[in-house]
Every structure is written in structure tokens, then in C-alpha cells.
Amino acid sequence: MTTTTPPPLEDHYKQLIQYFLHDGAYNEHELIDLLNNLRDRYDLKIKVQNEIRTFTDTFLPLLNKHINQYGMEIKQVVSEENENDIYFVCIQNFKPQFVKMDCSYTEKEAAIFEKILELIITNDEKCIASRVVFEAILANDLKMTQKEFGEIMARFHRDKWIESGPHNTIILHARAILEMQSFITDTYRDDTYNCQICRRLLIRGLVCSNSSCDVHMHRSCAARYFLRLSNSTNKKSAYPCPTCKKEWNKNDVDSVLKTTKTTNENSDQQPTTTAVNKRQRTSRNNNNSTTNRSVRSSARQVISESDDDN
């Protein structure tokens, strides 16, 4: 039996792989900035405002074809907390434990993250206050100052393992849920659910108000479900549970549909492409992720200098 060797990669594909291996995950704005930089450097035929479609349709299949043989894959995932936040995450399919995912994390950092994981998933609200995490770590006889703990938590935020939740809490980032789903489902089987719509792992989401019904949905999946119902019936207030058919919580429906409507309106109001608009968009995105961008830019500078030397 013969195996087909993927064709050699062009330089811009190689750089994309390097970036994903270094940073792990990008949101859409960060990925657009990255693709714009590659377009300028390599004179790529990527239309402005069409970067994400070009990446998913053209770049992603070829990238995955090359990295799949090493047990890695770049996947698209939606935030559980903010259904309009989309990320592209490089995961390692064969290493479910956090300590093995990145050799740059120390055993102490891995132990802290595993404690965060435990506290969040076993909590009814699927979120936890940083203070509770710090107290739990000290109770486990793990020596650490509050300053050191703050620096580690900041790194977990920056690397997209955790994100800010409601009422000054922390929740698991979409990257953590995607990359660690096997470990989570095996370890916390009684504390996790599958989304009724997509059937994937769900940590935080919408829950049917019927106490005898066990239906859970991602906010992004619920948005599609409720939107489909609103477009297919004249009874705009009829949003039944997909299983028990009890009317879904009105506040949940209004919240999800309002967010979806706002996103669609913002998309429709995008200005025509000009050099000025490109600069404005880049500036806005940089302001939204200053910390992440400083880490990414330093990595790209190293890679660029290495390429120039070659």
C-alpha cells in the first residue's frame, strides 16, 4: 500500500504553520492581520475583507494535510460565552493532558491549570473566581506567591486557555475545551454535556427550563436554531425546546437573537475597501489585543529575521 506525499509547501504556508505552532490560537481579527502581512510580503492574491474565507477554503485544507501526519490539526471553534467570537486553534490530537501540550509550561503551571479545570467543570455555574483558585492551590501545599500566581494566570489568558467570565470570574477558553475535550469527557463525565444541536462537548451554554429535560445548547448553536424558527413561522414568540417542546426561556432567546442581529447589521455596514479603511481596521484590532499582539509580533520578528538571513 503506497502513501501519497503532500506536495511541497510554499514559503507563506510554512510561515503560517510556524505562527500556529508558536501561538496556538488566533481570533478572526488576529488571523486577518496575519494574512494581510503575508499578502504584502509574498504578493498573495487575497481579497481584502475576504481573508477568512480564503483561509478556510484554500489555506486550511492544505495546512492540515501537511500537519495531520504529526498528530496536529488546525480547527475552527466558537467561544461558548460569546457566540460571535471565532477562533482558529492548532490542536494536538494525541496528547490530551495539559502538561504534555506545551513543553514551555512547567509542572507547577500544569498543576495550576489542572486545578482550574477541576474547579470550573465541577462548579454548577462552570466558572470560578481567581481568589478561589489561589486558595485551592495553597490548600494543596503548592508554594506560590500572589504575584507569581497573577503572572501565571495572565499567561493562561494570553495563551487562550482561560478567559474572563461573568462577575469577575474565569471560564475555560474555546481553545482549552477543543484541545482537551477527550481528557475532560474521560475525567469529568458526570459534569459535562453534549450540545443538542452539534453534539460536541459543552461546558457553558443554554439549558432547557424544563427540569425533567436535559437539553443543553451552545449559544452559537442556539442562535442558528432560534433564527431558523423565527424565519419559518409567523409566530415569532414560539421557540420550543428541540426535545421536550416546552417554550424556551424568553430571556435566552432575546439575548441570542439580539446578538446575532447586531452582528449581521455590523457586517452589512462594512465600508467599501480603501487603504484608509485597512489602516483603521488594523489599528482597531491592535488596540483590542495589545498584549497578545506584542507576543505574536516578537515571534514574527524572529521568524522574519531568520528568513532574511537565509
Image (cartoon, rainbow, N blue to C red):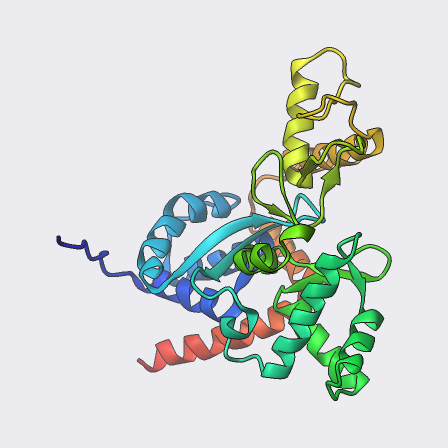
Residue under the point 71% across and 36% down: 214
Residue 214 vs 170, above or below: the answer is above
Q: Residue furthest right?
A: 167
Residue 232 in the image, given as x and y percentages of width and height? 65, 15
- Camera-nearest residue between 118 and 260: 118
Q: Residue at x 48, y 60 (%)?
A: 90
Which of the 4 quarters of the picture holds residue 259? top right
Image coordinates for residue 35, horizontal then vertical, percent: 47, 56
Q: Residue at x 53, y 80 (%)?
A: 104
| Position in image of residue 74 (x %, y %) | 45, 56
The image quarter in which residue 266 lies: top right
> Where residue 41 sits: x, y (%)?
41, 63
- Taking the spot 84% from the left edge, 61% from the top edge, the residue there is 168
Query: Above or below — where is 88 with respect to 141?
Result: above
Residue 181, picture quadrant: bottom right
Q: Is residue 27 left or right of residue 71?
A: right
Which residue in the rendered view is the most extreme toward the left? 1
